[in-house]
Amino acid sequence: MPIDKLRPMPVDKILSFRRNPDPLQQQRQQTDEMEDIPKFLPTRLLMDDDASRRKEDNDDMEDAVRLPPPRRSPVSMRNLQRELYSPRQCMNALKVMVGVLTICLLFTTIPLYRRQTKQEKDTLKMILLWNEPSQVDTPAHLECGCLVTTSRSYNDRAFDAVVISADHPYSLDGLTGIKRTPKFYVVYAAKKPMTSSQNPVTDLTLPPFNLTMTYRLDSQLIWTDYYFSHTNLARRLKWFRAPSKSFADDMPASTKLRLDSELRKKSRLAVYLVYEVNEETLPESLYLEELRKYADLDAHDSCLGTDDCSHYHFMLIFEPTACPDYVPPQMSMAMDKLLVPVLIGGGNLTNLVPSHSYISSQDFATPKDLISQLKHLANSPKEYRRYFWWHSIYKLRHASQPYCALCSLVQKAPGAPEIRQRSYSTGGFINWWTEYQCPNRSTTFL
């Protein structure tokens, strides 16, 4: 029979025939024209075409009845059992059980967590920002365990403190209607110089403030965006030691690498940020005109983004006020970007920033002398590098949570700042306000 007329047959059935041969197959004689046919082949392959067609339907039925399903060998069975009870299979089963238990625990604990979170929020201390324009109508946020909000009727909760920022115009109308706790703080807050703040004692009524939180060192809470601390402690420093000559030995390796990398970028002399020219800033503007006669100075709107002013040696900072304890914000920005600040105007910064970390125009007789010193330092890398000695022991930190100290105070948490209450009867706040005077400055530096 031609091989191309043979009917295809599954391999498993062929193997089954091999294990269970047909008795008729063993008795059939081979013809002379054909090669010896293997005795294990099925019956249909041993018949001629007609017989194969006649028995075609019956063979399938007989095979199904006669042939048992394939059986695993003993070796295969042992391998299967060994695989089922292997450590890997046990670990997979254990992972499935752990996953199921985790899902069940989540479904049972989530409602409890939500209930507990709601109870904790109900017991949190509340701080109200009375006139903060950048956070109007924003939802409450959690800061150091207190809820800080601008909503004056937040969930009908009583407030523990209300912060009135003197950096922005404010009115005390409606303050008495605020729901409050028995120990309620009315906080007078300011980060800008007091000369530009609204006078809180002009009215005939006594100011309601019983807590001060400003940049002034005699405030009950000191409030600034940046502050100095030791490298390994976050506590604000109140004094600084003298510069060290061997500061490079004490500087951390990462800080030293960053300093070396930034100093290699510097190619320009000085930059200053554009400011509003008015009667208050007129003396600085006249001083700037004199500086421009002796050096090319660049002006930038900001030092943010790609142009971060890192290629400048110095930053000129014009400060029209001379209020005690006030550090211009640009000072911290320049020091954070590893530029040496050059303060033109301003007050006394002793015990406010490390010594020999900035340059003051008051130490030079003329603008020409100041420019000569800046050029000398830019061409003397070793002397210029000494202005960064403070990185060896100090760190300039950003106060990312400005109301944290106030929160610790109202919570009476461990480590909370100790304050001296100023009573209304003694006029404590009025004395605090009137005792502070910004010196009268001259109208020109020339």
Image (tube, rainbow, N blue to C red):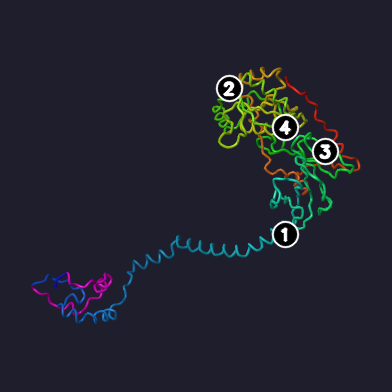
Measured in 3D between alpha carbons, the distance from the residue under mark 1 to the one under mark 4, in whole angstroms, is 42 Å
User: Mark 1: few, some, or many residues within 10 Å (few <14, many ≥20)?
Assistant: few
Query: Circle 4 — which element?
Result: loop
Disc 2 marks a residue whose amino acid type is Pro
Q: Residue at x 63, y 24 (%)?
A: 386
Of circles 2 and 3, the one toward us is: 3
Is 55 rendered above or below residue 155?
A: below
Measured in 3D between alpha carbons, the distance from the residue under mark 2 to the one under mark 3, in whole angstroms, is 47 Å
Q: Which residue is mark 3?
A: 199
Residue 225, how many percent across, how many down?
70, 38
Foreground residue among 274 and 323: 274
Label for residue 381? Answer: 2
Lower sequence index among marks 1 and 2:
1
Q: Is residue 297 left or right of residue 54?
A: right
Lower sequence index among marks 4 and 3:
3
Label for residue 327? Answer: 4
Residue 52, how many percent across, how many down?
18, 79
Measured in 3D between alpha carbons, the distance from the residue under mark 4 to the one under mark 2, in whole angstroms, is 27 Å
Measured in 3D between alpha carbons, the distance from the residue under mark 1 to the one under mark 2, in whole angstroms, is 60 Å
Foreground residue among 415 and 165: 165
User: Mark 2: few, some, or many residues within 10 Å (few <14, many ≥20)?
Assistant: few
